[in-house]
Image: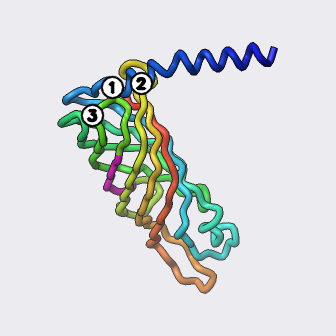
Amino acid sequence: MENGMGLKWYFSIIFLIPIIVYCQKEEFKNKGFSVETSALVLFPYDFKIPSEHDEISETSTKSKILGTNVHLNYYISKSFAFRAGIGYEFINQPKIDYIPITGGIKWILNDTKESLLTSFDLGGQLGQVEKFGVLMRIGVGYRFVIFKKILGDFELCYSHQNLYKTFTSPDNQKKSYHNIESAGFKIGIEIY
């Protein structure tokens, strides 16, 4: 029975190779709109909020940024797009919800559907923050075909954001401005 399963996987992979090679040669559209949705996981490595509570003061090791975003891309060529995005994200430690609003660019390194890509987004946050802070994200990834006009992508991301939220330190000083540097990944689907 195990040999039958192994052969089934082997023939499935052999069957997929021509499809993958064909898709890599298939050109992407010249101009127009696409919609992209993605899930994001970031791990802050430079983020500390002073507080009377131990669980909040350990934000540098226990915090994660999780979220989902939607981008509207406008391709001016096969390999370059302007984009606007909105989403919902939260930091789990301490719990802060916010809405990122960004504008940016996406550069596809090859003019085919399957290709390496880079992205740059700049904007800020609304929501459970005291004022609009700067948010910058840079991504490097790979785009692949899922089905006809549905593409998937995986990106490694670097994020820098300024968060305006007031916390009180043990010596009763209030700190309301926080720099958060983080790195992680996002997985998305693009429909064009």
SS at badge 2: helix
Q: Position of residue 28 (x, y in %)?
A: 28, 28
Q: Residue type at mark 2?
A: Val
Q: Residue type at mark 1?
A: Lys
Front residue of 122/174: it is: 122
Label 1 crowding class (10 Å Cα cut-off): few <14, some 14-19, many 20+? few
Q: Is residue 170 left or right of residue 4?
A: left
Q: CA distance from mark 2 to mark 3?
A: 15 Å
The magenta span reads: 118-125
Q: Is residue 103 left or right of residue 8?
A: left
Quarter holding the C terminus is: top left
Q: CA distance from mark 2 to mark 1?
A: 7 Å
> Quadrant of residue 18 in the image?
top left
Quarter holding the N terminus is: top right
Q: Are marks 2 and 1 in contact (CB under 8 Å)?
A: yes
Q: Residue type at mark 3?
A: Asp
The disc placed on residue 21 is 2
The disc placed on residue 141 is none
